[in-house]
Image: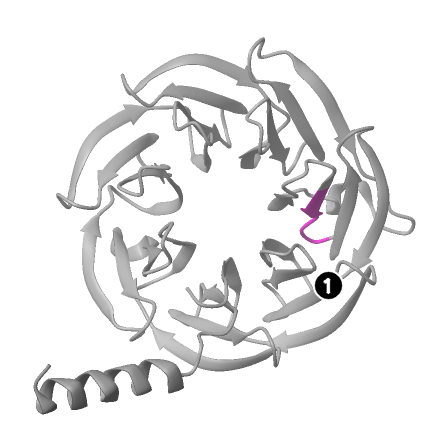
Amino acid sequence: MPMLARTVSAIALTALMTAPAVAQEVWVSNERDNTISIIDVPSLEVIETIQVGARPRGLMFSHDYKVAYLCASDDSTIQVIDTATREILHNLPSGENPETFALHPDNRHIYISNEDDNITSVLDVVDRRIVAQIPVGVEPEGKAINHAGTIAITTSETTNMAHWIDTTTHEIFHNSLVGSRPRHAEFTSDDKRLVVSAEIGGGLHVFDTETFEELAEIRFEIPDVHAHDIQPVGFRLTDDMTRAYVALGPANRVAVVDMQNYEVLEYHLVGRRVWHMAMSDDETKLFTTNGVSGDVTVIDLVRGEPVKTIKVGRFPWGAAYRPAGS
């Protein structure tokens, strides 16, 4: 090898070996500030704030963590952000007023809830175009896609339904009645159960994905908190399917649910109007977005208690976790 080539190779290798490793991060969308706060997980401090589009809500990473996707709701667009440089790369069509979304396992198609138009839009992020629009119920909100990539779920707040969509035909093949104002939806890691929160109904609903039968409705009771303030919204399921962590809105609590027996185990006091959350990849920390208090509560899931409050922007809404080295 020529001397110059050897020198260049050595410099490149040294740079690679000395480059700082990417630490764990939590990205939080601030609905009223039009920003994203980036929290460094090791230090539990905000290390950067990114200016984004109008009324940012839904937030998630691509499966390879190279980009973040953001619903800029009032701009009616999906913004694509480079996770390394923090720069907005481009905007994607989304349909009117995108609020939440889910990324297909193919890392290419995003299913979007268009709240004002009662539609689920399917976006191809490679071709940068909407490839399908699926009429659903009134005020679509929550989105979920099973791990097999065969079923997409849209929850409709006013229709009080979870719509089951075939991802091949883009047609609804079943509707499940849920409690009043269904919000978030997730599949268990084995795809055998679908879980949906009902904000005004006050319950967490569990469905069998083969029979569509409702297996359980989990209710919440908190001493000295009125029932109408207990409003299940965002939640997270553990990979082993033993626990669900449920944000209870104006109750300012996160409930811990045993998903084997469908029993509430305990409640954690967090900030005001807890909305959504992110969980670390080792499932030892939970980060809750507290809209009214404008902060994030960090819950240590090993110790079973909140350990820190982190101030972010106004009305934090969505949260997404980025693992180390990604």
Question: Which amino acid does the dot numbered 1 rest on?
Answer: Ile
Which one is in front, 218 or 160?
Answer: 218
Q: Position of residue 81 (x, y in %)?
A: 29, 64
What coloring was used for the rendering?
one colour
Q: Is residue 72 above or below residue 209?
A: below
Any magenta on residue 247? yes
Q: Quadrant of the N terminus?
A: bottom left
Q: Is residue 24 above or below residue 11?
A: above
Q: Position of residue 30 (x, y in %)?
A: 46, 67
Q: Is residue 182 above or below residue 171?
A: below
Element under label 1?
strand
Q: Is residue 18 above or below residue 99?
A: below
Lateral position of residue 252 relative to residue 189, left or right? right
Q: Residue at x 11, y 91 (%)?
A: 3
Q: Position of residue 60 (x, y in %)?
A: 41, 53
Furthest residue toward top? 211
| Category of crowding for the residue at label 1, using alpha-carbon neighbours closer than 10 angstroms: few (below 14), some (14–19), many (at least 20) | many
Q: Quadrant of residue 2?
A: bottom left
Q: Quadrant of residue 294?
A: bottom right
Which one is in front, 223 or 85?
Answer: 85
Q: Quadrant of the C terminus?
A: bottom left
Q: Position of residue 311 (x, y in %)?
A: 60, 78
What residue is shown with label 1? 299
Lateral position of residue 77 relative to residue 50, left or right? left
Range of magenta residues: 244-250
Q: Quadrant of residue 258?
A: top right
Which one is in front, 97 or 321?
Answer: 321
Lateral position of residue 282 relative to residue 191, left or right? right
Any magenta on residue 246? yes
